[in-house]
Image (cartoon, grey):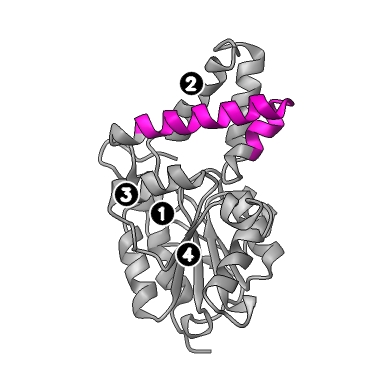
Amino acid sequence: MTPDSAGVSAAERAPAVVHRTQQPAARDVRLAVLAMVGTTVFDGGLMESAMARTLADQGVAAGSEQFERMLRYARDTSGTSKLAVFRHLFAEPARASAANSFFERSCDELIADGVIQAVPGAEDAIGWLRDAGIKICLATGFGRHTQNMVLESLGWMGLADLSLCPADAGRGRPYPDMILTAVLALDLDDVREVAVVGDSCADIESGLRAGATTVAGVLTGAHGEPALRAAGATAVVQSIRDLPVLLEPRSA
């Protein structure tokens, strides 16, 4: 989902609505693993534009059935490793690698054009997590170079305790590798002290596979509430700005 002309999506203008099962209070959470595009960041159509450019570069005719099928697959697998997406789309490893490199160059150009924006309230939510003593990991399906470009464009380098991409952990979503890598890197004792927040079904699946207690979906990105619920989300909130409402200490 992209923001409207005012820079705020309809979901974010709506009052905070939290649909949840029993969740731990903030004092029980020591690490929040937050997805980037669609959760803390609006990409301004970056992924779709870069993917369309890449498919055309690989000789897939724009508007053809193959082009639309490949683009749809990229949308449906939002949140997963982009290299893994290209390995699925193109059987030859060398072609998949070339496509991924072209995709990253296209992302660079689009980021330089200023398409990246923070989701409204994202920095406030991250600040609240810090004040609550909760460590923060920003996780993405982009490669490391693109992730750094996004962070730099927002002035977010150093905002989180850790940032991870699939190459840092071995595999991307829906595998649990990035979450478990964050647990090890930040010296947590128990994965049940992790909250995972994302906009895609892949985010939810990775959180559940890792064993996190809170695996929350947000409605500012790839998938809607029915899909997030079907994937197993323990809670669904309108936006990352509502994360404090979800995690704050509550009376029994």
Res 53 label: 2
Chain part drawn in magenta: 84-110
Between 198 and 172, which is closer to the camera in this rendering?
A: 172
Question: Regarding mark 3 in the picture, which secondary structure is present there?
Answer: helix
- Magenta stretch mostly in which secondary structure? helix
Residue 12 is situated, as x and y percent measured from the top left of the image, at 37, 52
CA gap, disc 1 and disc 3? 14 Å
Q: Is residue 246 left or right of residue 234?
A: left
- Location of the N terminus (image quadrant): top left
Q: Residue at x 48, y 21 (%)?
A: 53
Say what amino acid the circle numbered 2 marks: Arg
Res 121 label: none
- Mark nearest the camera among 1 and 4 is 4
- The numbered mark, 2 or 4, whose residue comes first in the sequence reads 2
- Mark nearest the camera among 1 and 3 is 3
Q: Which residue is mark 3?
A: 152
Say what amino acid the circle numbered 4 marks: Cys
Between 20 and 139, which is closer to the camera in this rendering?
A: 139
